[in-house]
Image (tube, helix red, strand yellow):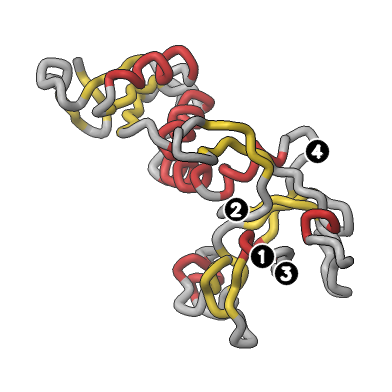
């Protein structure tokens, strides 16, 4: 009997999921995921950056024209011919399935190396939610110690946003519609303050030049 993809390439990513109608979270081993991390099993003869056995990750792109001005400026995400990791169309006309497939092939330009001391399950979210928050924080210069950053919402993106902002040394205020998330924001994620957006008294702050003033 042929081995499954998980047996040939052992799954090394884990998470938590609701597996029945109770809604209770429980540990879950999975191989079909939005963010892709894994181990290189083969390389092309022209590949120079990676070798078999390397721990790697792939983000939301696997291709582009590499000829336009956007590509020349390392802005392949704006390339009119970019190829997304899943549900896109590859150069040969086939559909890209990314992490929803048993294995995938990617140009080394779109592959990143994962350090051996960084767990794969912790790395995967950085390739989606992580870059979604890291990029604007760096682009708009909100990465300087002493600055005050507001993070609206404490969902998947919000969690990462708070962690990055605190790692940059900024003061962080979480703004949420859910008072129940205050403990998590301050005690677990290290936010400095918490505002309930539906509480008009709490929201009596003046926002100017991207900063909060009490």
Residue at 28 percent of width and 25 percent of height: 178
Residue 26: x and y, percent? 58, 32
| Residue at numbered disc 1 | 101
Rounded to the nearest angstrom, the CA distance separating label 3 from label 1 is 10 Å
Rounded to the nearest angstrom, the CA distance separating label 4 from label 3 is 22 Å
Q: Is residue 14 left or right of residue 209?
A: right
Residue 124: x and y, percent? 62, 45
> Neighbour class for label 4 at 10 Å: few (<14), some, many (≥20)?
few
| Residue at numbered disc 3 | 105
Residue 197: x and y, percent? 20, 26
Residue at 85 percent of width and 67 percent of height: 43
In the structure shown, which secondary structural element does the residue marked by tag 2 occupy?
A: loop
Q: Which badge, 1 or 2, is on the more N-terminal residue?
A: 2
| Residue at numbered disc 4 | 116
Q: Which residue is farthest bottom? A: 92
Residue 168: x and y, percent? 50, 27
In the structure shown, which secondary structural element does the residue marked by tag 3 occupy?
A: loop
In the structure shown, which secondary structural element does the residue marked by tag 4 occupy?
A: loop
Quarter where residue 108 is shown: bottom right
Rounded to the nearest angstrom, the CA distance separating label 1 from label 2 is 9 Å
Rounded to the nearest angstrom, the CA distance separating label 3 from label 2 is 16 Å
Is residue 30 or residue 107 the one in the foreground?
A: 30
Rounded to the nearest angstrom, the CA distance separating label 1 from label 4 is 24 Å
Q: Which badge, 4 or 3, is on the more N-terminal residue?
A: 3
- The quarter of the rendered structure image containing the C terminus is top left
Quarter where residue 194 is shown: top left
Residue at 58 percent of width and 35 percent of height: 16
> Neighbour class for label 3 at 10 Å: few (<14), some, many (≥20)?
few
Q: Is residue 43 left or right of residue 131?
A: right
């Amino acid at each position: 009997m042929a081995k499954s993809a998980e047996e040939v390439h052992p799954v090394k990513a884990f998470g938590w999921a609701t597996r029945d109608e109770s809604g209770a979270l429980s540990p879950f081993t999975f191989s079909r995921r939005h963010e892709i991390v894994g181990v290189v099993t083969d390389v092309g003869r022209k590949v120079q950056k990676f070798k078999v056995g390397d721990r790697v990750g792939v983000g939301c792109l696997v291709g582009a024209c590499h000829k336009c001005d956007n590509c020349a400026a390392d802005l392949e995400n704006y390339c009119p011919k970019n190829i997304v990791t899943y549900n896109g169309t590859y150069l040969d006309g086939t559909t890209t399935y990314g992490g929803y497939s048993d294995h995938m092939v990617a140009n080394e330009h779109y592959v990143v190396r994962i350090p051996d001391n960084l767990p794969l399950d912790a790395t995967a979210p950085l390739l989606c939610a992580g870059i979604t928050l890291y990029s604007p924080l760096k682009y708009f210069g909100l990465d300087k110690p002493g600055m005050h950053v507001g993070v609206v919402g404490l969902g998947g993106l919000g969690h990462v946003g708070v962690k990055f902002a605190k790692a940059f040394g900024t003061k962080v205020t979480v703004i949420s519609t859910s008072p129940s998330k205050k403990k998590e924001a301050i005690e677990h994620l290290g936010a400095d303050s918490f505002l309930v957006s539906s509480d008009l008294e709490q929201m009596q702050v003046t926002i100017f030049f991207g900063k909060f003033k009490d």
